[in-house]
Structure formats: structure tokens, C-alpha cells
Amino acid sequence: MPHEPVDDRPFRAIGVPRPRADSRAKVTGAARYAADLPAPARELLHARLVPSLYAHARIRRIDASAALAMPGVVAVLTAADLPLRATGDGRRSEPLARDIARFAGQPVALIVARSEAIAEDAVEAVVVDAEPLQPELDAVAIAASAGDGDPRIVSTHHTAHGDAVAALTTAHVLVEGRFVAPWVHQGYLEPHAATAFLDEDGTLAITASTQGTFDARNEVAQLYGLPVSRVRVTAPTIGGAFGSKECLLEPLVAGAALRLRRAVRLVLTRREDLAATDPAQAVVTELRIGAGEDGRFTALDARLVYDAGAYPDASWEWFAAGLMAGPYHWPAIDVTGTGVRTNRFGSGNYRAPSGPQGLFALESLIDELAARLDIDPIELRLRNLAREGDPMVAGGPWPRVGLAECLRELRAHPAWTGRGSLPPHEGVGVAAGVWRNAALPAAATCRLEPDGTLTVATGVVDLAGSVTILAAIAAEAFGVPFEAVRVVVASTDSAPPTPATSASAITYGVGPAVRAAAEAARDQLLAIAADDVEIDPGDLEIVDGVIRPRGAPAEGRSVAEVAEALAFAWGSPYPPVEGHGATAHTELAPSGTAHLAHVRVDPETGDVQLLAYVAVQDVGRALNPALVEGQMAGGAVQGIGRAFVEALVHDDAGQLLTGTLLDYALPRASMLPPIETRWVEVPAPEGPFGARGMAEAPVLPGPAAIANAIAAATGARPRELPMTAERVWAAIREAGSP
């Protein structure tokens, strides 16, 4: 696997492939998730949602008398029963529908009972007197007809520089298209689950399958008018999230626990999870791009309509311009993104939110430009990449990104160089993208133990092996073996401030804090050891757990020996060795990626077989190659799922037709070829040892790369996701291809 050299430093703890710390527990079934944890000392009550049967309705009355008469039913809570102190027009501030039901499946009441079975039975006994209203489901039609001040428009964001219309008019080649991407569920294994109770001192304690304990704590405290110090959130082992698990159930169980003064647990069924959570929103993109005779891009003009669903608080129209510009330089650009409220779910985040939808449009048209200009598609992309220092559409200059290296890696790959000799109905396509990643402040502590081991404390939620990565960072920074580091994930009561596990923020954001904490602890120990032998601390180093004079490794003493003899000796004159690291970034570290897909298409049926797949990414530095490969392959599979099978579908009345895993298709192993992963290392200056956040980028190019491969194989270009056999067949017929 070819990598670019980063530097000559002899790293010991990082760069080594290791399994995740939680791998064995998860594989053997020993891991305990939010629904598995024991209840607090008092009796645990179980909750069940009463959903709206209508996509749009006025709630006139909720009759819970029959349910309350059932043995074991403790309460039936409605919106008026929750002791909310903050209200608003968002999902979190309306855990239960008040006067209007906004989508089919929206919770309108919460059954609380002594068992899940009793609560489930009681749902059927609740009578919701609701007046059906006409559901509004067509975001594009709403956007086209809406006037100024229309409450159905969440927001409109317009970004322009240069005269894109004039530039397109005079472009040597102009291509355009309308691209449709549907609602998509995040597809995690563990459904949403949360438990809340009041501790002995009155603290509201919440245990939840959540991506961010501090975010959940702050949200709940604000909603219920509590000091943040009186809310404690703990995250157990989590079974996947991909952007969905961001304070969705916590307000519900918190309100129930505060109202009833009892412990309440809510675990969604799979059907509820598909119908009542926060999937990725649908996007319709109308895009025009132009280029000169030399292949230089001249302008981009785009109109994007985002279906925001029932609530306005998680729609991505504000990101439209930065998304549509991609990693390229555009002399002129004009982009409008409009978020529209409809009677569907509340929209949420999904790994690289809106990225695959936008790149599906942009990268498809770039391939069309390449064909019209008779330029190699990879060369066209390389020719137009934004360079370091160029202005980003979203503001600020482009930092150094290794996307050119990724594209060159694909250009030399045998699957690309050999595409000219493929059999009929086979094709190879590429697509590229950059995800900006987040730069969030974080803190961590690192404590030396009497036996010479380290304990790192953080509040990170480990979704993708973060604990394993942070342990390696601490070991490398301090100078001890990886096995000498233990990472403790604490609750919000005791953890240092930690961002949510989202937006590729953990390695890039928390990693530097862990490194700083470990280096601070190391320097404290070196000062103790130097004082003992009366030399300058700068003349000492720690390598493989041994404190030794620089240049004289044979004279060293182990960290454990020094800790026991000096730092932890009875009556020691030295303070405990504990480092604290708190960091905030001044610049982003985007991750660039390029994918290649090789397909065979049956022109008689439209069936597409994926024969080969290659993913290349700039990771800055591969801190753990095994986890890098896992992230890249996992993201590729999610992109393949969106390309071929995944879509949440409603009927004309707003009823979900894909409400079970029998109806909502996910990618299967039989659909997948071997996924080849390669990476380059272009260090991020502020990343830990040069590493970049890399979780978002792997999901970006998949649908576009596959669409370009289908077009290469058939001459027909799919413009709607998922690219089912029926749609591919229709595109072939429309194009008149054989």
C-alpha cells in the first residue's frame, strides 16, 4: 500500500494496526448497551410511544382513561404533562406533539407502565381524537409556490460571486441536470434507547445511547430549566449512530422522570426507530456547470431544495454553496439552498450530512463535461482542484488537502488504466470529494498510576474506535507502550469537556487534548526524575516506558520504578503526576477522498453488478491502519447502499411504506465486491501527529462513482437515487443505448 512519507520520527505506539478496545465484548455479545443496563435501586418503569396515525392532524383530545384502567399502567403523559421550561419550533423542544401532529409516527403521548409488554398493550387503548389535515409532502412544489414570509420555508441561503449566468452563457461547454436523492435512514444496529431517574441528591441522571453526553446534558438542562450541574448523562457502549443519536429520546425520558419521580426507560422498536427518529433529508438539485475549451471550469449555478421534514432545526440548506462547490475552483458561482417544511419525519444528520446527495449531482456533471471535452475525467478534476490559499466558498482559505494525491493514486490503478479493454456493458467511474471536518475544543486528563501505567480521562463516546486511538496518542506522547494506557470514559459529572462524536471531531479535536495532557504528565515525571539525579529535565527522555538520559539508554530506570520510588513513596515531596490538556483549533483539516467503481450492467433488465471498488483517502496520518481501513470500507458500503437500495418512501397520505427492515433495504454482503482501501498521508498541522478526522469523507463519492460507472457502461446517466434496476433500465431506454 503506497503511502507518502510524513517524517522520519521513529513512532512506536501509533501507526500500528490494533483491534478496537471494545471488539471482543461486541463480537462475543458481552457488551452491555443502554437497554441492557441494570435499573437503579427503585423500580424501573417502561415507556412506549403513542404515535400519530396521520401525517398532518389537529389534536382535539387524548382519552387515556381505558389505558389508565389497565393493571400495571402508571401514567399516560401528553405534552402538557412534561414540565418544560423552554419551548420552540424544534424537535427537542416538542418531545410530544402538542396541538398539531406533523408526521405519521410522531409521538403524541407516552405510556409509562411496569413492563414493556403492558405499555405496548396500553398503546392500543389510548384514543386520540384528531382532525386530519391535508399533508404537504412535495418540497419542490412548496418551494416553487411559496411567497415571502411563507412559514413552510425554513430558510433560504444564497451565495454568489462573479456573474455565473453570463459565464455559463459564454462557456465552451455547458452541462446541466436535475438530480433526486431520497430520505435515508442511518441504518445503525442498536435502536434509540434512554433511561432517566432522579438520584439520591436530586440530580437528574440519564443513561442513553447518545453520541454526545455533554450536548445531551446541556439540551435537557435548558429544556427543563435545570442547572447543568443537576443533570448527569452517561453513555454506555453504543451500537452505531451515524448522526442520528443526538438528544432525541433524552428529553422524553427526562420529562417523564421529573413528572413521575420514578425511573423511566424508553427503548424504541425497530418500526418506531424507522418511523419516528431523524433520518437524512431528501434533496433535489438542479445544477448547471460550464468549462472553457481548455477544460477549466468557468461557472456553477445551482438550486437545491432540502426537505426539512416536520421541524426546521436540522436542515442543511445553509451548507448548500460549500457543498456544491466541492473541492474545485470556480471563477463564478451562484447557489441557492432552500429548506422546506413538509409532513415527514424531523430531519437529522447522517455521516457527511447532504454530502453524498450533492456530490451525486456535481461529480456526475463533471464526468459529462469530461466526455464533451474529450478529457480524461481524472485529469479534468486535477486541472480544476482548488489549491492551498484559494478562497473557500464557505469562507476562509483552502488549507493543504491531499486530494490530488488521491486522484493520482486512482489514475495509476489497473482498474482505471485498463478500462479501455473492458467487455461490452462494463464500465469504470470515479468521483472525488472533500469534507471540511469540524474543529471543536476539548479537554482531557492523564494520570500516572503507582505501577507506571497511565489513566486517561475523557467524555468521548466511542463509535469508531476512538478509545483505542486516544490510548495510542497518549502512549506515544508520554513514551510508554500502548498496553500501559487505560482510557476511562466518564459521565458528565467527572469527564473533562468533550465534544460529541460527530463531524469527524474526535481524533482531530480530542486527540490534541489527550496528547497535551500526556505530554504535561510526562514533563512532570521527568522533572521528578531529574531532581532525584540532579540533572536538567531536558536531558532526559522516556522511551518504551524507560526514563533515560538522552544518548545513554543503558542508564535508564523504568517509569514504574520511578513512580513507586519517588512519585508515590510515603511522604513524597512531589505532587501527584497528572497532566491536563485543553485545546482549540485555529484551522480546519479537510479530508479528501476519491473512489473508483467497476460495474457490469445487464441492458435487458437494468441490473447492475458491482465488480470492484477502490477507495483512496488523505488521512493525514494513519494512527491505526486497521481502524483507518475499517472506516474507509464502512463508509464505502454506506455509499453503495445509498447508490443501489436505500430509500424511505411515503405514500400520498404521508404514511411510511418502508417501515420495517423487510421493506427498507440495506446493502447485503452479496452485493459487495472486495473493497480495496488505500490512503495517502498529507499531515494536518494541528492534528495529533498530523492526523485528520476521517469518518465523514469515506461516504461521499460512492453514489457518484457508481453512477459514472453505469454511464460509462451504458451511455445512459442515472439521475435519481437509489439507482434501481428499473431506473437504470428506463435511463438506458431513454438514452436509446443498446
Image (tube, rainbow, N blue to C red):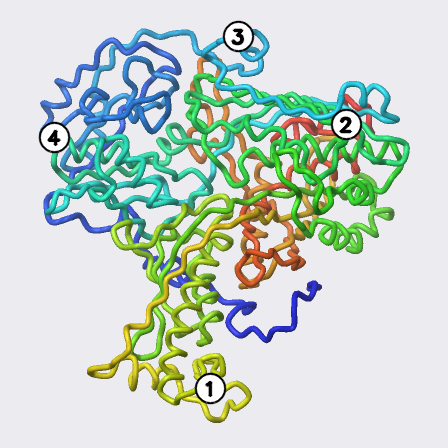
What kind of element bears circle 2? strand
The percent coordinates of residue 543 (x first, y second) are 49, 80
- For marks 3 and 1 on the same chain, the one whose residue lies earlier in the sequence: 3
Give the spatial CA distance, label 1 vs label 2.
61 Å
Name which residue lies at 39% across and 45% down.
Answer: 211
Asked whether residue 543 is in view, the answer is no
Give the spatial CA distance, label 1 vs label 4.
66 Å
Name which residue lies at 13% across and 19% down.
Answer: 66
- For marks 1 and 2 on the same chain, the one whose residue lies earlier in the sequence: 2
What kind of element bears circle 3? loop
Residue under circle 1? 548
Q: Where's the C terminus, which quadrant? A: top right
What's the residue type where badge 3 is placed?
Asp
Q: Is residue 363 left or right of residue 56?
A: right
Which one is nearer the viewer's eye here, 177 or 35?
Answer: 177
153 vs 406: above or below: above
- For marks 4 and 2 on the same chain, the one whose residue lies earlier in the sequence: 4
What kind of element bears circle 1? strand
Circles 3 and 1, Cβ within 8 Å, touching? The answer is no
Circles 1 and 4, Cβ within 8 Å, touching? The answer is no
What's the residue type where badge 2 is placed?
Ala
Q: Which mark is residue 148?
A: 3
The percent coordinates of residue 284 (x first, y second) are 61, 23
What's the residue type where badge 4 is placed?
Val
